[in-house]
C-alpha cells in the first residue's frame, strides 16, 4: 500500500481539510457542535484525530461549511477511503493495538530514525534472520504464528523503496557481534545491510564498543516525523513491560519528550562516535576495543 493510501494518512488529510473548511467558513467548533446537536468536544476530537469522522458526518460538515460540489464530493470520497481496511489488517491476530499504530506511523512518516542496541532493526532484517530471531523469542512452538510474524516483517520493508521517505539507523556494535541463526544467516544479513546502505534514502551507522557510554544507549527507540499534522514527532519505545507511543503533540505530562530522543540521536549521528557500515566493519577485524565476533 502506498503512503498516500494508508488509512491513517487519509484520516489526517481529511481532518485537516475539514478544519480548514470550517475556518474558511468562519465558524467556531462550538457553533458547529451546536448546529449538529453534538457534544462540544466532538468537533475538537475530530479535528485533533482523537476520533474518526464517519462518511455521514463528513457529508453534513461539508454541506454546513458551504463547499462547492466538487470539493465536497472529494472529501466524502476521502472519508470512505479512510475507513477501508489497511493491508496489515490481515495480521491483526498477531498485532497489539500499539503495534498496529506503530506500523501505520512507520508507513506515513516522512523521516524514520531507529536506534537499536541488541538486534538488527526489523526494516533491515533478512527473512532468515527474522525467522531465527522471532523463533527464539516466541513463547510457544506455533509455526503459523511464527510465519505470520516473519511475513509481516517482510511486508513492512516495502516502504524502503519509497524515496519520498528517509530512513536513518544507528546500531550499537553489539547488534553486529550477536550471532543470530548461525554464521550463514549472519553473512546474508551483513550483505543485506551493505545493499540497503547503498539506497539513497537509507543511512546505516554503528557505534563501536570502544565508545563506551553515549546518549540514550540503554534503550532501543524509533522516531517518526509525521506530515501532515503540523510536523508531529512520535517516539516508539519497546520493553519487556510493553510498548509505548509518545507524541510531541500529546498534552499529557510525560517523563520524557520525543525531542529528547531526537536530540540524543542527532548527537550520536553528528559525532565521530558513529561509524559507517562497511565491509571491513562487518566482515573484517573489529575495531580496537571491540569484542571478538
Image (spheres, rainbow, N blue to C red):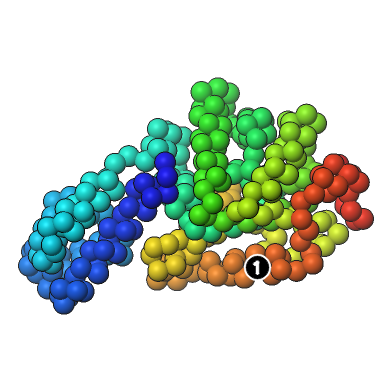
Quick check: 169 above or below 248?
above
The answer to whether residue 110 is left or right of residue 206 is: left
Please give the name of the residue rendered at 44% of the width and 53% of the height, measured from the top-left corner: 108
Q: Is residue 242 above or below residue 191?
A: below
- Quarter of the picture containing the N terminus is top left
Does residue 39 lie above or below 55 as drawn?
below
Residue 241, x across and y down, in percent: 55, 50
- Total marks in image: 1
Q: Position of residue 156 (x, y in %)?
A: 52, 41
Camera sees residue 247: no
Q: Is residue 57 above or below residue 152?
A: below
Going by the image, does 190 lie left or right of 42? right
Q: What residue is drawn where x is 21% and y is 49%?
A: 77
Residue 265 appears in the figure: yes
Mark 1 lies on a secondary structure that is helix
Q: Position of residue 125 (x, y in %)?
A: 64, 39
- Say which quarter of the image contains residue 139: top right
Residue found at x 79% / y 67%: 272
Front residue of 85 and 21: 21
Residue at the image point whose x is 78% and y is 58% from the top: 275
Q: Which residue is mark 1?
A: 266
Amino acid at each position: 500500500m502506498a503512503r498516500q493510501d494508508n488509512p491513517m494518512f487519509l484520516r489526517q488529510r481529511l481532518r485537516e481539510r475539514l478544519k480548514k473548511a470550517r475556518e474558511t467558513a468562519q465558524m467556531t467548533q462550538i457553533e458547529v457542535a451546536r448546529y449538529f446537536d453534538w457534544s462540544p468536544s466532538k468537533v475538537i476530537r475530530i479535528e485533533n484525530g482523537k476520533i474518526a469522522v464517519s462518511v455521514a458526518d463528513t457529508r453534513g460538515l461539508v454541506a454546513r461549511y458551504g463547499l462547492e460540489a466538487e470539493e465536497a464530493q472529494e472529501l466524502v470520497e476521502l472519508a470512505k477511503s479512510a475507513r477501508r481496511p489497511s493491508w496489515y489488517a490481515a495480521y491483526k491476530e498477531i498485532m497489539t493495538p500499539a503495534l498496529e499504530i506503530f506500523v501505520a506511523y512507520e508507513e506515513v512518516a516522512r523521516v524514520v530514525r531507529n536506534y537499536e542496541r541488541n538486534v538488527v532493526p526489523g526494516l533491515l532484517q533478512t527473512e532468515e534472520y527474522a525467522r531465527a530471531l522471532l523463533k527464539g523469542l516466541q513463547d510457544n512452538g506455533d509455526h503459523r504464528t511464527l510465519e505470520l510474524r516473519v511475513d509481516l516483517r517482510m511486508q513492512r520493508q516495502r516502504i524502503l523503496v519509497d524515496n519520498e521517505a528517509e530512513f536513518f539507523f544507528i546500531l550499537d556494535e553489539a547488534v553486529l557481534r550477536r550471532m543470530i541463526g548461525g554464521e550463514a544467516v549472519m553473512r546474508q544479513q551483513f550483505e543485506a545491510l551493505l545493499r540497503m546502505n547503498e539506497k539513497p534514502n537509507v543511512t546505516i551507522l554503528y557505534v563501536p564498543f570502544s565508545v563506551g557510554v553515549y546518549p540514550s544507549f540503554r534503550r532501543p527507540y524509533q522516531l517518526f516525523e509525521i506530515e501532515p499534522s503540523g510536523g508531529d514527532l512520535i517516539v516508539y519505545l519497546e520493553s519487556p513491560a510493553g510498548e509505548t507511543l509518545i507524541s510531541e503533540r500529546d498534552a499529557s505530562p510525560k517523563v520524557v519528550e520525543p525531542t529528547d530522543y531526537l536530540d540524543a540521536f542527532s548527537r550520536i549521528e553528528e559525532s565521530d562516535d558513529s561509524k559507517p557500515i562497511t565491509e571491513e566493519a562487518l566482515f573484517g577485524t573489529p575495531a580496537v576495543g571491540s569484542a571478538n565476533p
